[in-house]
Structure formats: C-alpha cells, structure tokens
Amino acid sequence: MPQISSVLIGYPPYILPTQKEALNYTTSIIERVNKQAVIYNNPLRTGFDLSIQSYKDLIDNHYISGIKEAGNPQKISVLNEVIDSPLIYFAGGEKELEKKICLGYNGLSSIAGNLYPLEVKQWFDSLLKKEDTQDYNLLKNKIDKLFEDSPLPLIKNEISIIENINFGICRTPLGN
C-alpha cells in the first residue's frame, strides 16, 4: 500500500480569507494530517494571495517541506533570503521554467510530464545543473503545442491512446 509522505494545501476559491484565517486553516490541516506539507498559492484561480510574512510564519512553526507559488514568481527569491529551512520551490508547469529556476525554483509540478515524463525530468535536471539544453528543442516544441489550447483534453486523449483505456471527454467547458 502506498504511503503518503506529504500533502498539498491550497486555498479554496471565492472565500478570500484574511492572512490570519489562511494561517489558521493551513495550521489546522497540518496538525490533523501530521505530515509534511507543500503550500500551494495560486491567486489567479482562488482570488487569495498568501503573503511573504504568512509563508514565513508557516515555515517557522510547522512541517512545510515545499511551496508551489503560482502567483508572483519573484516571491521565491524573497523567500530564499528570509527563510533558513531548505525547501522545495515547485514551478507550476513548464512555462518560463528557465526564468523560474534563476529565481530559485528547484522543483517542478509538471503538466507535460504526464505525456513526456522522462524527457521533462532530464530537461529539468539539465536546467538545474545549468547544462546546455539545446537537445531539448524538440521537447520544448511538444510542450508549446500542448499549450496552444487547453492542455487537459489533449493530455487525457493521449494517455487514453498510450494506456489503451478510455478516459472519456473532459467536463464542460474544457474541450468544447
């Protein structure tokens, strides 16, 4: 049976908590699950943006092992300066990945990795090591094509073909 080593904690859309409410929410989850946690801040999808101070308070007091910052990528540079704990800073997807690594991102939550897991891992590792990534132009072209439209219907269709199972179609409005 698989073991859960950490949980991803995001903030619900539309609720718009205060920073204090978000801290209480996050803390209550961490205390209940008693696991390492990755904080997922995605203001575009939720309308809420976790502040640098709130990140710092959570990291100083709890078992935070990582951050997935989908809002302002510059926050990672600031967090690297004000936080002593070693953390994984997850880039959400491959868009502007090179720039994010320069800002301090050192992990990847990959969308394209669903279709090209080995290639994406090798490319990401090369970027982290600051190696020449010329060999990954074909992968970059595949990733660009994946994001020409909503990637989820394409990923679902491709995995259905590769795995020879019918995933069906994406729910509306995706894939219309």
Image: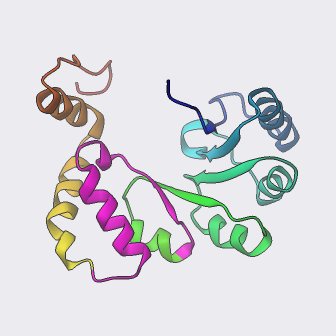
Residue depicted at x 39% and y 50%: 110
In the image: residue 15, left or right of residue 41: right
Does 146 appear above or below 134? above
Residue nearest the observer in this picture, 83 or 96: 83
Does 55 appear above or below 122? above
Q: Quadrant of residue 99?
A: bottom left
Does 34 appear above or below 71? above
Q: Position of residue 67 (x, y in %)?
A: 63, 53
The span shown in magenta is 103-132
The answer to whether residue 46 is magenta is no
Q: Position of residue 40 (x, y in %)?
A: 61, 44
Q: Position of residue 135 (x, y in %)?
A: 18, 74
Q: Position of residue 114 (x, y in %)?
A: 29, 42
The answer to whether residue 125 is magenta is yes
Residue nearest the observer in this picture, 101 or 70: 101
Q: Quadrant of the C terminus?
A: top left
In the image: residue 169, left or right of residue 130: left
Does 30 appear above or below 42? above
In the image: residue 102, left or right of residue 160: right
Residue depicted at x 88% and y 41%: 20
Residue depicted at x 20% and y 79%: 134
